[in-house]
Every structure is written in structure tokens, then in C-alpha cells.
Image (cartoon, rainbow, N blue to C red):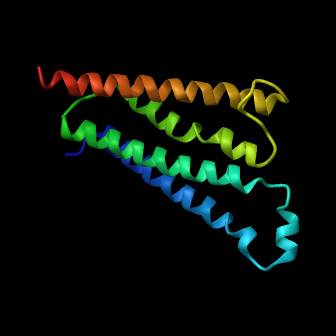
Amino acid sequence: MTDINVKLLVFSGGLAIFWSSLVGLFMMIPHLRSKTLKKRTSNIDFRQLLAAHLDWIMLGLMQGLAAFLIFAFSIKPSIWVVIAMIYGGWMNAVPYFLRAFGINAFVFAGGILAKTANILGGISVLAVIISWAFLLSAAGQTFF
């Protein structure tokens, strides 16, 4: 029977790639012939949207690799390690996404949304690093 941690990570990773595909579909707008649609989306920075799109793909793959590591090494991480990995896998791209709409979450300035996204984005980086440290440590212990 497959571990719940593996299922959660694989499902979340697949969902992230699906979401990124939807974002990619939205990114086609500048390439359409509709002047009305282009005018309505002229305030969107599609380069930042591309960064979020690619980041969510990579983070989805990261979650899949974490699931494979758990499966391949038969490790039993705490559910909190998995939750932190999933949180990081989703939240890490949000600052790029918000920046595409004029909210700079890369600096601790601006309104409450920008500041909150900055803090949550910083926590997501830490969550991913700590999750990988726990997973790799547990996998490494199977060698010794």
C-alpha cells in the first residue's frame, strides 16, 4: 500500500503542474489578435507570469521527486515535513504571480498584501529547505 505522504506529494505536484498549465494558457493572450483582450490585460507583466508558470512546474516536479525519495528509500517522514514541502511548493511562486499584477512581494514594502506575501514567500523557502534536509537525512541514514 502506498504511503499517504507519497500520495499527498504526488497529487499536490500534479495539481501544481495542472495549475501552471492553466497559467500558461492565460499567457497566450499577448499572442492573440484580439486588441480588446490585449488592452484589458495591458497592465499584466507577462514576463513575471512566465516566471511563476515555470516556477510552479519546477515545484510540482520537486514534490514528485520528494515523493519518489520517500518511496524509494522507504522512509517515514513526519506529516509536517510533507505539509511544509507542499506549502513551499505552492507558496514559493506566489511572489512572481503577484508581481505580474503589480504587487511586488519580493521586498517588505507596500500594502498589507505585498508584506504578507513577502513573509509567506520567505517562509516557503525555509519550509522547502528544511523539508529537503529532513528527507535527505532520513534517506541517507538508510545507507549507514
Foreground residue, 49 or 4?
Answer: 49
Q: Is residue 117 left or right of residue 112?
A: left
Q: Quadrant of residue 134?
A: top left
| Residue farthest bottom in this picture | 33
Q: Quadrant of residue 39?
A: bottom right
Q: x, y (%) of residue 141? A: 18, 21
Relative vertical location of residue 89 with respect to residue 118 in this rendering, above or below: below
Relative vertical location of residue 99 with respect to residue 85 in this rendering, above or below: below
Relative vertical location of residue 131 with respect to residue 86 in this rendering, above or below: above
Residue at 37 percent of width and 48 percent of height: 10
Q: Is residue 77 left or right of residue 130?
A: left
Q: x, y (%) of residue 68? A: 27, 43
Q: x, y (%) of residue 123? A: 58, 24
Q: Quadrant of residue 8?
A: top left
Residue at 56 percent of width and 56 percent of height: 19
Labels in figure, total: 0
Residue at 47 percent of width and 37 percent of height: 86
Residue at 83 percent of width and 71 percent of height: 37
Q: x, y (%) of residue 104? A: 77, 36
| Residue farthest left in this picture | 144
Q: Is residue 108 left or right of residue 95?
A: right
Q: Which quadrant is the C terminus positioned in?
A: top left
